[in-house]
């Protein structure tokens, strides 16, 4: 039986329009935009409200130390790379990491992709200038094209429809790969054995051998491996482009409440989390579990004010604070933030984003990160929570399943010269497949040290 919706709830979903939303494109044709958003509002939801509720319960468990979140994927997805091979490789990487982390943490790992919707990106400038020519900045495939021409850089509302359909096909593949046996524990374990065949990773042999013995022990005990052939895999993206999020918001027939059905989980970025801003207002009105990025300037009072606005009743699993402090700052800045929020008493899940606070420009001019800095921030995150007796709830990683060369270091020892071999990202650098797995093994080492 459907629950009747309060008309004021529906009307409130458009309150953001009068708030001057930041990081939105200047659409050249309002009529064309209206036609596209009207069409989007009639299309099927990409996810269901019940799935978002299921995720919220799992994130609540992560906040209590009963699970661990692994969230990974591209900085910015592109339409052209939404191929079966690329999607499979990203899922494969996350699944491989999850098996290692599940064993090392002795906890269920919540698997979530920055996938099936991560098409919009905030930018520090509205425009870009090359050789004296100034054009609108590239804001992600959902808005405009990376090619530096006036036509390509003009925001095009039709791209919202392409983003929807590409997300739908991506989700279809995700569901097929994660429920059809591709994600089985035995298969993923075999992939990890292949990773260990590389002599560069000999330091992880002991952990890998322990996992192998655990799998064989399960088999000897008659474990039902058929029951481990499928996994839950959730979608997520930054809730940035409100002209996309609003028409994909649906009223749940069970409760009469709105859910953003573009993804299971959306997060509010560091650039758009202003208390009186359009993004915070909009997402305060939907029921999805929410992430909020917190950078080094965030105060404890800022964090509490966001909880007041987005989760005043303190519902467990509703709020995930994703901290992005930088390796050199996390140990100094994170403790006061965690202490203030913990003293408030309303539950949150703490997750580490070790990518965005550690960007550098290489000597050869590439935007990159050092793997050692990324891991140092992860280590600092665990150290802070261990020292305070609080729970490190997960990791938020920019990664790809391919053998790109965008992040310096790791056991493969990618150097400045090596970046040019396969530097493919259009925005921020990502860990490659091998670096991602290496991170998982190093996190296990951190867990053991604690």
Image: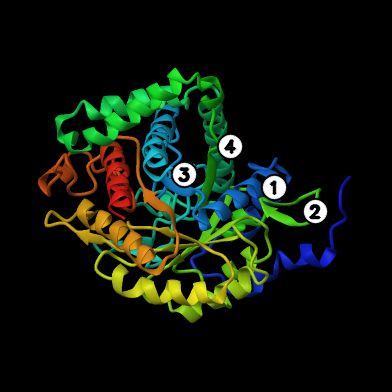
Across and down, in percent, residue 421 comes to 17, 39
| Mark 3 or mark 4, whichever is nearer to me | 3
Cβ atoms at labels 2 and 4 below 8 Å apart: no
User: Which is more N-terminal, label 4 or label 2?
Assistant: 4
User: Which is more N-terminal, label 1 or label 3?
Assistant: 1
| Mark 1 or mark 4, whichever is nearer to me | 1
Tag 1: Cα neighbours inside 10 Å, few (<14), some, or many (≥20)? many
Residue under the point 46% across and 39% down: 79
Say which quadrant the N terminus sits in: top right
Cα distance in 3D space between marks 1 and 4: 16 Å
Image quadrant where residue 352 sits = bottom left
Label 2 residue SS: loop
Is residue 432 or residue 102 the one in the foreground? 102
Which residue is tagged 1?
Answer: 49
Which residue is tagged 4?
Answer: 168
Which residue is tagged 3?
Answer: 107
Question: With 91 as the anchor, is 419 left or right in this view?
Answer: left
User: Which is more N-terminal, label 4 or label 1?
Assistant: 1
- The label number, if any, that marks residue 75 in the structure image: none
Image quadrant where residue 437 sits = top left
Compared with residue 336, is residue 229 higher up or lower down, i.e. above or below?
above
User: Which is more N-terminal, label 1 or label 2?
Assistant: 1
Cβ atoms at labels 2 and 1 below 8 Å apart: yes
Which residue is tagged 2?
Answer: 255
Cβ atoms at labels 3 and 4 below 8 Å apart: no
Cα distance in 3D space between marks 3 and 4: 30 Å
Cα distance in 3D space between marks 2 and 1: 10 Å
**Residue 134 visible somewhere in the drawing:** no
């Amino acid at each position: 039986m459907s629950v009747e919706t309060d008309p004021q709830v529906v009307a409130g979903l458009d309150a953001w329009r009068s708030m001057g939303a930041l990081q939105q494109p200047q659409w050249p044709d309002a009529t064309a935009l209206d036609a596209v958003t009207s069409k989007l509002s009639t299309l099927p939801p990409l996810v269901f409200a019940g799935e978002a509720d299921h995720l919220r319960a799992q994130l609540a468990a992560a906040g209590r130390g009963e699970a661990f979140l692994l969230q990974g994927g591209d900085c910015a997805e592109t339409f052209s790379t939404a191929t079966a091979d690329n999607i499979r490789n990203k899922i494969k990487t996350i699944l491989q990491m999850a098996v290692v982390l599940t064993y090392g943490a002795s906890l269920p790992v919540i698997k979530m992709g920055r996938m099936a919707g991560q098409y919009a990106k905030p930018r520090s400038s509205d425009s870009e200038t090359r050789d004296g020519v100034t054009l609108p900045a590239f804001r992600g495939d959902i808005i405009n094209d990376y090619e530096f021409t006036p036509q390509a850089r003009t925001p095009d509302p039709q791209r919202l429809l392409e983003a929807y359909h590409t997300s739908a096909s991506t989700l279809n593949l995700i569901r097929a790969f994660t429920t059809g046996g591709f994600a089985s524990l035995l298969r993923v374990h075999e992939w990890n054995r292949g990773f260990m065949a590389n002599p560069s990773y000999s330091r992880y042999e002991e952990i890998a051998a322990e996992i192998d013995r655990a799998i064989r022990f399960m088999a000897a005990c008659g474990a039902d491996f058929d029951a481990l052939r499928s996994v839950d895999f959730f979608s997520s993206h930054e809730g940035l482009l409100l002209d996309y999020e609003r028409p994909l918001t649906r009223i749940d027939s069970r409760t009469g409440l709105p859910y953003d059905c573009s993804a299971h989980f959306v997060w509010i970025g560091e650039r758009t989390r202003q208390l009186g801003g359009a993004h915070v207002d909009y997402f305060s009105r939907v029921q999805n579990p929410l992430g909020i990025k917190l950078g080094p300037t965030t105060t404890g009072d800022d964090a509490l004010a966001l909880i007041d606005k987005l989760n005043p009743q303190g519902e467990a699993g509703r709020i995930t604070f994703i901290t992005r402090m930088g390796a050199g700052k996390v140990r100094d800045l994170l403790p006061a933030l965690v202490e203030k929020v913990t003293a408030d008493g309303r539950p949150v899940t703490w997750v580490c984003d070790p990518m965005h606070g550690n960007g550098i420009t290489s000597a050869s001019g590439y935007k990159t990160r050092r793997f050692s800095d990324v891991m140092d921030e992860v280590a600092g995150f665990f150290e802070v929570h261990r020292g305070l007796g609080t729970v490190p709830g997960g990791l938020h990683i920019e990664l790809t399943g391919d053998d790109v060369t965008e992040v310096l270091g790791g056991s493969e020892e990618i150097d400045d010269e090596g970046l040019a071999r396969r530097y493919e990202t259009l925005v921020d650098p990502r860990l490659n497949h091998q670096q991602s797995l290496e991170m998982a093994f190093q996190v296990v080492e951190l867990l053991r040290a604690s």
